[in-house]
Amino acid sequence: MGDSDLLSGIGSSLACIVVIGIAAAVVAALIYLVKQARKEELAAKLELQELVRSIPRESQAAFMIQYNAQKKNSTTAVVLALLLGGIGAHKFYLGKTGQGILYLVFFWSCVPAIIAFFEAFAMPHTVTQMNREMAREVAAMLGGDIATPAALV
C-alpha cells in the first residue's frame, strides 16, 4: 500500500465524517426548531381564542373557516427552510414569491442555503406573526374589536 492509497483512504474517511457531522447538525437543529414551533403555536392558539371572543357570535364560524384556510404552519416552514431553503421553498410557502425566485436564481452559490439555515431559527416567530396579522385582518373584516385582546398586542 503506497502513500497515495493511504492519503486517499484518509481523505475519503474525513469526507464521510464531515457529511455525517453535517447531517447530524441538521437533524439536531430540526428537532430543536420543531419543539420551538410547537411552543409558538400553543401561545398563538391561546391568543386566537381571545380574538375569536371579540368577534360577534354569528361571525365566529366564518372567521375560523377563513383563518384556517389562510394560516401557515410553522413546523412546515421550518422543515422547508432547513431541507429546501437553498431553493427558496420556505419563501414560496409563506407567499413571498419574489424572494423565493431570488433564492432560485442564486441557489447554485449555496448562499441561499446558508441564509435559509439561519432563517429557520426565526421561522416559528415569523410564521406566528404572519398568522396574527392575518387573523387581525380577518377579524376586522368580520366586525371584531381587534384592540380588545391584550394578548395580541
Image (cartoon, helix red, strand yellow):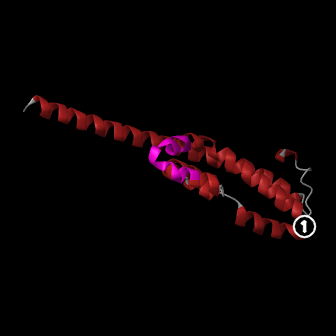
Quadrant location of residue 131? bottom right
- Say if the magenta span includes residue 110: yes
In percent of width and height, residue 77 lies at: 59, 53
Give the extent of the magenta segment: 102-116
Query: Who's the residue at 88% across and 49% down the image?
Result: 149
User: Compared to 60, does 41 lie above or below?
Assistant: above
Quarter of the image with the N terminus is top left
Which one is in front, 140 or 63? 140
Q: Give the residue at mark 1.
A: 57
In percent of width and height, residue 112 lies at: 52, 45
Q: Is residue 103 shown left or right of residue 43?
A: left
Mark 1 neighbour density, 10 Å: few (under 14) some (14–19) many (20 or more): few
In percent of width and height, residue 35 lies at: 59, 45
Which one is in front, 80 or 92? 92
Q: Is residue 8 shown left or right of residue 110?
A: left
Query: Who's the residue at 24% across and 34% down the image?
Result: 11
User: Compared to 19, does 98 lie above or below?
Assistant: below
Q: How many marks?
A: 1
- Say if the magenta span includes residue 3: no
Quarter of the image with the C terminus is top right
Query: Who's the residue at 63% across and 46% down the image?
Result: 123
Quadrant location of residue 93? bottom right
Can residue 45 be seen here? no
Can residue 13 be seen here? yes
Q: Amino acid at mark 1?
A: Arg
Query: Who's the residue at 55% across and 52% down the image?
Result: 88
Q: Secondary structure at mark 1?
A: helix
Magenta region, mostly helix, strand or loop? helix
In percent of width and height, residue 133 lies at: 79, 53
Which one is in front, 93 or 106? 106
Q: Is residue 8 shown left or right of residue 104?
A: left
